[in-house]
Image (tube, helix red, strand yellow):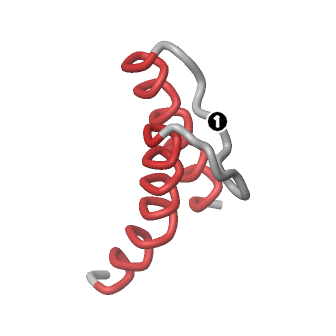
Amino acid sequence: MLVPLYAALLYKGMIYLFVKLFGRMPVDTSFEFHVNIRDVLFNLLYFIMITVLPMLSLLFI
């Protein structure tokens, strides 16, 4: 039950920062060819933080 909590808190935190910095919600960039680089970076950072960081934390437990 910790993984959904981590995912929800991470997403809410990243959305809060994105809206605070850019004044709008991020747009989903999957299967899009003309996208804003800020939206791509948001999605890429979320993907890395939701998959890689939990896997790396398992190495140190």
Is residue 26 or residue 51 the one in the foreground?
Answer: 26
Check disc 1 and report its element: helix, strand or loop.
loop
Which quadrant holds the C terminus?
bottom left
Amino acid type, mark 1: Val
As drawn, the residue found furthest toward the bottom would be 59
Is residue 35 or residue 22 the one in the foreground?
Answer: 35
Task: Decide: is 34 above or below 3.
Answer: above
Tag count in the figure?
A: 1
Residue in view at x 49 percent, y 53 percent: 46
In the rendered view, does 45 fall on the left or right side of 26? left
As drawn, the residue found furthest toward the right would be 31
As drawn, the residue found furthest toward the left would be 60
Q: Position of residue 8 (x, y in %)?
A: 60, 44
Q: Position of residue 48 (x, y in %)?
A: 44, 64
Residue in view at x 46 percent, y 33 percent: 13
Residue pointed to by mark 1: 27
Q: Position of residue 51 (x, y in %)?
A: 50, 70
In the rendered view, does 4 fall on the left or right side of 10? right
Judge the density around disc 1: few (<14), some (14-19), many (≥20) Cα neighbours within 10 Å. few
Which quarter of the figure has residue 27? top right
Which quadrant holds the N terminus?
bottom right
Task: Decide: is 45 above or below 52.
Answer: above
Residue in view at x 58 percent, y 42 percent: 35
